[in-house]
Image (cartoon, grey):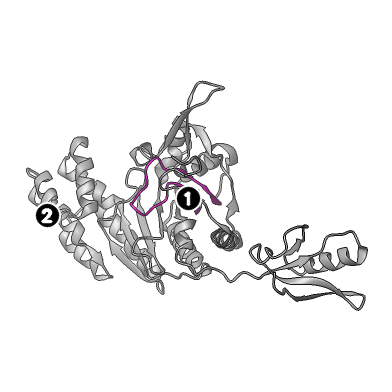
Amino acid sequence: MLRWVLPEYIQDALPAEAAKLEDLRRRLLDAFRLNGYQLVAPPLLEYLESLLTGAGQDLQLKTLKLVDQLSGRTMGVRADITPQVARIDAHLLNRKGVARLSYCGSVAHAVPSSLTATREPLQLGAEIYGHAGREADAEVIRLLAEALQAADVGTSRIDLGHVGLFKALVAKAGIGAEREEPLFDCLQAKDLPGLRDLLSGVADDVREALLALPTLYGGAEVLARAREILPADTEIAAALSDLQWLADELEGLPISFDLADLRGYHYHSGVVFAAYGGKSPVALALGGRYDSVGRAFGRGRPATGFSLDLRELAAQVADPVLPGAVLAPGGRDPQLQAAIAALRDNGESVVIELPGHVGTWREAGCDRRLVLRGGAWQVEPLQGE
C-alpha cells in the first residue's frame, strides 16, 4: 500500500477548494457576527464523557476514541461541536441572559454518514442559549436562510418538524425503550409495513396517528391535517401551535413541514428543521431546539441553533475565479520593495521570484510580472513563463 494514501472518506483540500472554503467561512462567520453571534473555538479533543454528555446515542458510534497517555483516561475526537458549545455556555461563560455563539471547525466521524459523505466535515454553526421562547427558533431559522443567501446558494425549502409529537405519541402508546428505537428508525425511513408490525397491540387512535406521521409532509395544509388525525393531547396541541406560529412568523421563507423527520431525536427537545438549497438533493443544514443538552452539564439553559458542513455547502458553489499573482524579482532595492508593498496594500498577491525556476511561475498562479521600465517599477503581463 502506498504510504501517502489517505484513509477512506478523508481528502485534502487543494488550493481552489481551500480558497472557496475559506471564503465561505469568512462570509458566513461575518454574517453571524453582524447579527450579534460571538465566535468560540472549542478543542478538537476532550475526555469522552464530556463529549458524549447530553448527546446520547446520536454521537456514540460516530466518535473516534483514544487513550490519553498523560492521564490514562479515554478521550474522543469531537464528532459534533454543539455539545462543546453547550459546555462553554454552561461552565465558562455563566451568563444570566442570552448568549449568541458561533463556531467553525473540523470534526471527525468514525464512519461516514452516507456513501458520499466525508469523515472530516468542516462544521459551522450558530446557537442561542438562554431563551426558551419560540422567538429564538425563528431567529436562527432566519439566520440560516441569510447564511445560505450569503453563500450564493439560496434556500429552496426549509422543512419544519417537532420531536414533541413523536414523544407524546410514544408516551400515549405505552411503548417501552426496546421498541422506541426501532419505531424511530421506521419513521425516519417512512417504513409503513415495519411500523404496523411494531404497533401491534397499541390503542387504535395512537396507532393510526403514528402510522399517519410519515404522510404528514408538505405545505401549510399539513398542520390542518395533523390536527384532524392526531389525538387530543396538550403536548401535541402545543407542538402544532409552535409550528403554526413559526410558519406565520417566517412568512416569505419557503417553509414546509415533515412531521416524521426526527434527525437528532436523542438530544433535540422541540422544533427541528432542515434547509435545502442549490442543487443538493439532501439537506445542507440541520437544526432545532435542544434544551436538555445544557442540563447534562449541570446548567439547564434552553438552546436552539443549526449547523452545516462547509464542505457540502462549498460543493454547491462555483469555483472562484481567483486573481493571478504578480511575479516580482528578488532583491533589496528600496524602490522595488516600495512597489511590492504598494501592490500588497492594494490586495494583490506578490510572489518573489526564486532563481532556477524559469517557465514554472504560471503553475504557481502568476499571470503578471513586476518589471523596471524607465526607472520605475510597473506591472506587465507575464510572457512565456
As drawn, the label of residue 277 is: none
Q: Residue at x 19, y 35 (%)?
A: 178
Badge 2 local density, few (<14 within 10 Å), some, or many (20+)? some
Query: Which quadrant of the rendered structure holds the C terminus?
Result: bottom right
| Prevailing secondary structure of the magenta residues | loop
Q: Nearer the viewer, residue 122 or 271?
A: 122
Mark 2 residue type: Glu
Disc 2: which residue:
208
Q: Position of residue 119 (x, y in %)?
A: 42, 46
Asked if residue 119 is among those painted magenta in the image, a careful observer would answer yes
Element at badge 1? loop
Q: How many marks?
A: 2
Q: Residue at x 60, y 52 (%)?
A: 38
Q: Nearer the viewer, residue 320 or 261?
A: 320
Asked if residue 161 is among those painted magenta in the image, a careful observer would answer no
| Sequence-wise first label, 1 or 2 | 1
Element at badge 2? helix
Mark 1 residue type: Gln
Determine whether, in the image, residue 337 is placed left or right of residue 190: right
Q: Position of residue 75 (x, y in %)?
A: 48, 30
Determine whether, in the image, residue 46 is placed left or right of residue 206: right
Query: Which quadrant of the rendered structure holds the N terminus?
Result: top left
Determine whether, in the image, residue 232 is placed left or right of residue 332: left
Q: Position of residue 365 (x, y in %)?
A: 65, 65
Magenta-highlighted residues: 100-124
Q: Position of residue 295 (x, y in %)?
A: 43, 38
Disc 1: which residue:
11
Badge 1 local density, few (<14 within 10 Å), some, or many (20+)? few
Q: Residue at x 23, y 47 (%)?
A: 185
Residue sitting farthest toward the bottom: 374
Q: With respect to residue 239, does 253 lie above or below?
A: below
